[in-house]
Protein backbone atom coordinates (compact mmCIF):
# COMPACT_ATOMS: atom_id res chain seq x y z
CA UNK A 1 0.00 0.00 0.00
CA UNK A 2 2.85 2.40 0.74
CA UNK A 3 4.20 2.00 -2.79
CA UNK A 4 0.77 2.87 -4.19
CA UNK A 5 0.57 5.98 -2.01
CA UNK A 6 4.08 7.03 -2.98
CA UNK A 7 3.34 6.65 -6.69
CA UNK A 8 0.03 8.50 -6.29
CA UNK A 9 1.80 11.38 -4.53
CA UNK A 10 4.50 11.56 -7.21
CA UNK A 11 1.79 11.57 -9.91
CA UNK A 12 -0.09 14.38 -8.14
CA UNK A 13 3.10 16.41 -7.90
CA UNK A 14 3.79 15.88 -11.61
CA UNK A 15 0.22 16.92 -12.51
CA UNK A 16 0.48 19.99 -10.31
CA UNK A 17 3.72 21.10 -11.95
CA UNK A 18 2.22 20.92 -15.43
CA UNK A 19 -1.06 22.69 -14.77
CA UNK A 20 -1.46 26.39 -15.55
CA UNK A 21 -4.60 26.73 -13.44
CA UNK A 22 -3.77 27.94 -9.92
CA UNK A 23 -6.82 26.26 -8.39
CA UNK A 24 -5.86 22.94 -9.96
CA UNK A 25 -2.31 23.41 -8.69
CA UNK A 26 -3.56 24.05 -5.17
CA UNK A 27 -5.95 21.09 -5.17
CA UNK A 28 -3.30 18.69 -6.44
CA UNK A 29 -0.86 19.64 -3.68
CA UNK A 30 -3.61 19.43 -1.05
CA UNK A 31 -4.04 15.74 -1.94
CA UNK A 32 -0.34 14.92 -1.48
CA UNK A 33 0.29 13.15 1.81
CA UNK A 34 3.92 12.08 1.48
CA UNK A 35 6.22 14.48 3.34
CA UNK A 36 9.14 13.72 0.99
CA UNK A 37 7.07 14.67 -2.06
CA UNK A 38 5.83 17.81 -0.30
CA UNK A 39 9.46 18.70 0.48
CA UNK A 40 10.40 18.23 -3.17
CA UNK A 41 7.58 20.56 -4.23
CA UNK A 42 8.27 23.16 -1.52
CA UNK A 43 11.97 23.48 -2.23
CA UNK A 44 11.87 23.34 -6.03
CA UNK A 45 12.35 26.95 -7.07
CA UNK A 46 11.11 26.24 -10.59
CA UNK A 47 7.64 25.26 -9.38
CA UNK A 48 4.87 27.84 -9.28
CA UNK A 49 4.75 29.78 -6.02
CA UNK A 50 1.19 28.53 -5.39
CA UNK A 51 2.54 24.98 -5.31
CA UNK A 52 5.36 25.90 -2.96
CA UNK A 53 2.95 27.77 -0.68
CA UNK A 54 0.49 24.86 -0.54
CA UNK A 55 3.32 22.44 0.20
CA UNK A 56 4.77 24.63 2.96
CA UNK A 57 1.33 24.81 4.57
CA UNK A 58 1.32 21.02 4.91
CA UNK A 59 4.95 20.46 5.88
CA UNK A 60 6.01 19.82 9.46
CA UNK A 61 9.75 19.26 8.89
CA UNK A 62 11.61 22.10 10.64
CA UNK A 63 14.59 21.96 8.25
CA UNK A 64 12.35 22.37 5.21
CA UNK A 65 10.45 25.22 6.82
CA UNK A 66 13.75 26.92 7.67
CA UNK A 67 14.99 26.62 4.11
CA UNK A 68 11.72 27.96 2.72
CA UNK A 69 11.74 30.88 5.19
CA UNK A 70 15.29 31.85 4.39
CA UNK A 71 15.57 31.13 0.68
CA UNK A 72 12.24 31.10 -1.16
CA UNK A 73 11.91 33.84 -3.76
CA UNK A 74 8.26 34.52 -2.97
CA UNK A 75 7.24 36.58 0.05
CA UNK A 76 4.06 34.62 0.72
CA UNK A 77 5.94 31.32 0.88
CA UNK A 78 8.53 32.77 3.28
CA UNK A 79 5.79 34.24 5.47
CA UNK A 80 3.91 30.94 5.64
CA UNK A 81 7.09 29.13 6.65
CA UNK A 82 7.84 31.74 9.32
CA UNK A 83 4.35 31.24 10.80
CA UNK A 84 5.19 27.59 11.45
CA UNK A 85 8.77 27.91 12.70
CA UNK A 86 9.54 27.59 16.41
CA UNK A 87 13.34 27.99 16.21
CA UNK A 88 14.08 31.41 17.69
CA UNK A 89 17.46 31.70 15.96
CA UNK A 90 15.86 31.26 12.54
CA UNK A 91 13.09 33.69 13.38
CA UNK A 92 15.60 36.30 14.55
CA UNK A 93 17.61 35.85 11.36
CA UNK A 94 14.49 36.41 9.26
CA UNK A 95 13.37 39.35 11.42
CA UNK A 96 16.71 41.07 10.93
CA UNK A 97 17.66 40.12 7.38
CA UNK A 98 14.69 39.35 5.15
CA UNK A 99 14.39 41.64 2.16
CA UNK A 100 10.65 42.14 2.68
CA UNK A 101 9.32 44.26 5.53
CA UNK A 102 6.15 42.13 5.85
CA UNK A 103 8.15 38.94 6.29
CA UNK A 104 10.36 40.66 8.87
CA UNK A 105 7.25 41.87 10.69
CA UNK A 106 5.72 38.37 10.63
CA UNK A 107 8.94 36.95 12.11
CA UNK A 108 8.92 39.57 14.87
CA UNK A 109 5.29 38.77 15.70
CA UNK A 110 6.10 35.06 15.78
CA UNK A 111 8.98 35.70 18.16
CA UNK A 112 6.68 37.71 20.44
CA UNK A 113 4.05 34.97 20.32
CA UNK A 114 6.52 32.24 21.20
CA UNK A 115 8.00 34.31 24.04
CA UNK A 116 4.54 34.83 25.53
CA UNK A 117 3.90 31.07 25.45
CA UNK A 118 6.92 30.39 27.67
Image (tube, helix red, strand yellow):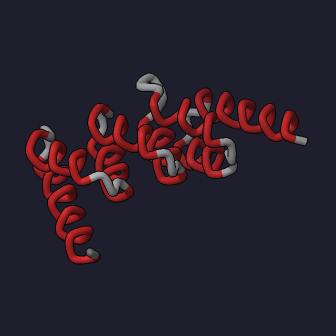
User: Looking at the picture, how far across and down is residue 50, in whole percent?
Assistant: 46, 43
**Is residue 57 shown above or below 48?**
below
Task: State left or right for residue 90 relative to residue 32.
Answer: left
Image point 26% across, 43% down: which residue? Answer: 75
Q: Total marks drawn?
A: 0
User: Looking at the picture, how far across and down is residue 46, in whole percent?
Assistant: 44, 23
**Is residue 24 shown above or below 4?**
below
Seen as rendered, the residue at the extreme front is 118
Task: State left or right for residue 80 relative to residue 24.
Answer: left
9, 67: nearer the viewer: 67
46, 113: nearer the viewer: 113
User: Looking at the picture, how far across and down is residue 55, in whole percent?
Assistant: 52, 44
101, 115: nearer the viewer: 115
59, 79: nearer the viewer: 59
Residue 77 lies in quadrant:
top left
Task: State left or right for residue 23 relative to residue 10.
Answer: left
Image point 15% across, 60% down: which residue? Answer: 108
| Quadrant of the rendering where the C terminus is positioned | bottom left
Task: State left or right for residue 102 relative to residue 33.
Answer: left
User: Looking at the picture, how far across and down is residue 6, in whole percent?
Assistant: 78, 35
Image point 40% across, 44% down: which residue? Answer: 65
Amino acid sequence: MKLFDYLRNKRLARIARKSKNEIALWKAVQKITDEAVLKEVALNASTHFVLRLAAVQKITDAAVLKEAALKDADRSVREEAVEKITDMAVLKEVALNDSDMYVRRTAKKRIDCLQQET
